[in-house]
Image (cartoon, rainbow, N blue to C red):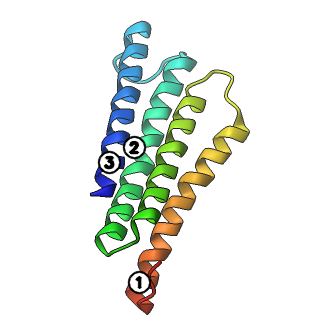
């Protein structure tokens, strides 16, 4: 049930990123590709990067919750994922992107995936659960 909250929030972020791509496509009159528009290319990558990482992270979070991970850990991981993806999407969409901010957001995203994976492996192999 906890992961459902984060999935719903992230779905709304995904829709916003999708609408941003549509807006930039209309502005640039491009149905495919980005042409020479840096803003459209950034919108496409913000959207693409989101969909490349969020489904796997949510799936791992769901398995952790299903297998009994303490609710405070589920909230911590879910909240971190939402924060990381909001920061990343906002930053990558900007023409004057900060690479430091982008790196921090990716480290947070990778940390959620890694911690969720290790937690599942510890439970499955050693019966150790956080």
Q: Nearer the viewer, mark 1 or mark 3?
A: 3
Count neighbours of disc 1 (C-alpha within 10 A) and say few if under 14, some if 14 to 19, many if 20 or more: some
Q: Earlier in the sequence, mark 2 or mark 1?
A: 2
Q: Earlier in the sequence, mark 2 or mark 3?
A: 3
In 3D space, how far apart are the residues under numbered discs 1 and 3 (Cα atoms)?
A: 24 Å
Marks 2 and 3 in Cβ contact (< 8 Å) = no
Q: Quadrant of residue 70?
A: bottom left
Count neighbours of disc 2 (C-alpha within 10 A) and say few if under 14, some if 14 to 19, many if 20 or more: few
Left or right: 39, with 7 as reference point = right
Residue under label 1: 123
Residue for point 43% across, 34% down: 47
Q: Position of residue 45 (x, y in %)?
A: 49, 33
Q: Which mark is residue 51?
A: 2
Residue under label 3: 5
The N terminus lies in quadrant: bottom left
Above or below, 120 against 125 in this view is above
Above or below, 6 against 23 in this view is below
Marks 1 and 3 in Cβ contact (< 8 Å) = no
Count neighbours of disc 3 (C-alpha within 10 A) and say few if under 14, some if 14 to 19, many if 20 or more: few
Q: Position of residue 13 (x, y in %)?
A: 39, 34
Secondary structure category for the residue under label 1 = helix
């Amino acid at each position: 049930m906890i992961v459902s909250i984060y999935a719903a929030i992230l779905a709304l972020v995904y829709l916003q990123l999708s609408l941003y791509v549509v807006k930039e496509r209309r502005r640039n009159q491009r149905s495919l590709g980005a042409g020479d528009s840096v803003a459209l290319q950034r919108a496409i990558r913000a959207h693409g990067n989101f969909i490349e990482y969020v489904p796997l992270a949510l799936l791992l979070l769901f398995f952790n919750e299903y297998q009994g991970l303490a609710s405070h850990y589920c909230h911590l991981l879910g909240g971190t994922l939402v924060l990381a993806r909001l920061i990343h999407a906002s930053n990558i969409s900007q023409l004057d992107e900060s690479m430091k901010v982008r790196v921090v957001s990716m480290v947070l995203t990778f940390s959620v995936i890694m911690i969720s994976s290790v937690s599942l492996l510890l439970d499955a192999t050693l019966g150790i659960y956080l």
